[in-house]
Amino acid sequence: MTTLHRPSVVTADHTEQAFLLLRTAFVVAPILFGLDKFLTILTDDWEGYLAPWVNDLVPGSAHDAMLMVGVVEIVAGLVVLVTPRWGGLLVAAWLAGIIVNLVSTGEYYDIALRDFGLMLAALALTLLAMGRSKA
């Protein structure tokens, strides 16, 4: 009896697929969010997400601060592209800072919770990248 072999889109290496999925997400998303700080397509009020105490710490206006945030986000996406092991940690740390900022505004708890999930995914990317370098 002959069995018919059907090619599968899903390969046996789910770990590699998970790595590539997370790496793509954490290259594209930070770069797009960073660019949007300059383009204001997603929102025209990025400054509204900045906690007053954070605004007091950074030089310049809240708008200037969000432009700096945009640069950091673009750089973080590029670091993930080049070295996902360290880029994942950078993105996770950046998201932790964003979470503290959002929670301290007394608003945006839903966005903070979403960013917590993203932070965990960035840490998972780091672990997957570490596993790849040992192979």
Image (cartoon, grey):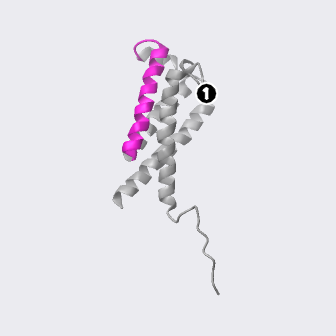
Q: Residue at x 60, y 32 (%)?
A: 111
- Image coordinates for residue 127, horizontal then vertical, percent: 43, 52
- Image coordinates for residue 67, horizontal then vertical, percent: 45, 20
- Image coordinates for residue 128, horizontal then vertical, percent: 44, 53
Q: Residue at x 48, y 51 (%)?
A: 20
- Magenta-tinted stretch: 58-84
Q: Quadrant of residue 74?
A: top left
Task: Name the side, left or right, on which 73 lies relative to 113.
Answer: left
Q: Is residue 59 magenta?
A: yes
- Circle 1 crowding by C-alpha within 10 Å: few under 14, some 14–19, many from 20: some
84 shown above or below 95: below
36 shown above or below 55: below
Return the residue nearer the eye: 98 or 74.
74
Q: Is residue 76 magenta?
A: yes
Magenta stretch secondary structure, dominant: helix
Q: Would you name the residue on which mark 1 appears?
A: 108
Q: Residue at x 51, y 16 (%)?
A: 52
117 shown above or below 105: below
**Rendered-image quadrant of the N terminus:** bottom right
Return the residue nearer the eye: 40 or 105.
40
- Image coordinates for residue 34, horizontal then vertical, percent: 48, 28
Amino acid type at image mark 1: Tyr
